[in-house]
Amino acid sequence: MSMTPTFAKTLGAASAALLMLAAPASAGGLSLKDDAGRTFEWSVNAAITSDYVFRGVSQSDNDPALQAGIDFTYGILYAGAWGSSVDEDFVFGNLEIDYYAGIKPTLGAATFDFGVLYYTYPGAAEPATGDVEVFELKAGVSGEILPSLSGSQTFYWSPEAQGDAGEYWVSETSLSYTLPKVFVFEPSISGTYGYVENVDTDAEMSYWNAGLTLGYDKFAFDFRYWDSDVDTLTPSGSNLSDERFVFTAKVAFP
């Protein structure tokens, strides 16, 4: 997930599964238990979105994108892969595939998340300097704050942005509130505030989103507003980080 030609050299590229807070990355999944009671589960998901926005910046040049992923869990361990179509002129290729793994221990009502992420662009041309791939470390905590209200705080860090553009870190704070069921839908509202800073260049940006997600069986329909405090312009003059509304439809199996 690149940060556009004008911002990639300062902030880099990174991602983790979908940033639709209220739309789950997987639903239920098949499960097997071992003698110690640990459970192995897996699930797959697919989505279509009107605009692939990552940390406030469109990765698909303001166009729709197709996405899919697979997730595995075993006790507190998890691993998975997720992919999306991207704009070829924007991120050196037309495909992004991310790999991730980590642990999710719990302490009381809090669930911690310590993981690693690796973002790749198969078939992409390498930048003039450095690599197109990006590696990140992740540390976060989430839990229920009040009945129906949950929150999370997550930090990401990378030693080098795309194209040897410097060390950076990211902070994301999210809230989600589950609403009463409406007809067949299970609605929730959610929002995220994020901050990115490049340690080597002091470049920084803030981004935020808020939206409504309607869950129905294995489907999730997300209506989300995005904006940021920077203008990320393409050579043709398109702004990839201004305010926008994004619709995403997602399904998860089994």
Image (spheres, rainbow, N blue to C red):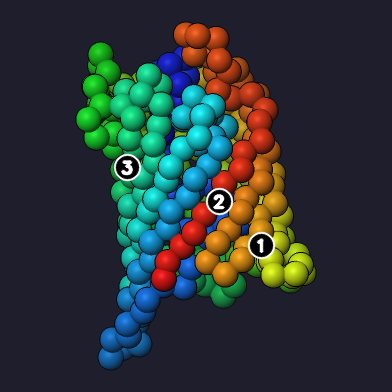
Residue under label 2:
249
Q: Is residue 124 above or below residue 171?
A: above
Across the whole image, how many numbered discs are drawn on residues? Answer: 3
Residue 145 appears in which quarter of the rendering? bottom right
Q: Is residue 247 above or below residue 146?
A: above
The quarter of the picture where the N terminus appears is top left
Q: SS at mark 2?
A: strand
Residue that appears at 32% across and 85% down: 33
Labels 2 and 1: the sequence-earlier one: 1
Residue that appears at 69% across and 70% down: 184
The kind of residue on which mark 2 rests is: Ala
In the image, is 195 to the left or to the right of 84?
right
Labels 3 and 2: the sequence-earlier one: 3
Q: SS at mark 1?
A: strand
The kind of residue on which mark 3 rests is: Ile
Q: Is residue 52 above or below residue 181?
A: above
Query: In front of the other: label 3 or label 2?
Result: 2
Residue that appears at 54% across and 35% down: 51
Residue under label 1:
150
Q: Where residue 172 sits: x, y (%)?
A: 57, 44
Residue 97's disc is 3
Judge the density around disc 2: few (<14), some (14-19), many (≥20) Cα neighbours within 10 Å: some
- Residues at circles 2 and 1 in contact by the CB criterion of under 8 Å: no
Label 2 to label 1, Cα distance in Å?
22 Å
Residue 163's disc is none
Closer to the camera in the image, 191 or 173: 191
Label 1 to label 3, Cα distance in Å?
29 Å
Closer to the camera in the image, 233 or 141: 233
Query: In front of the other: label 1 or label 3?
Result: 3
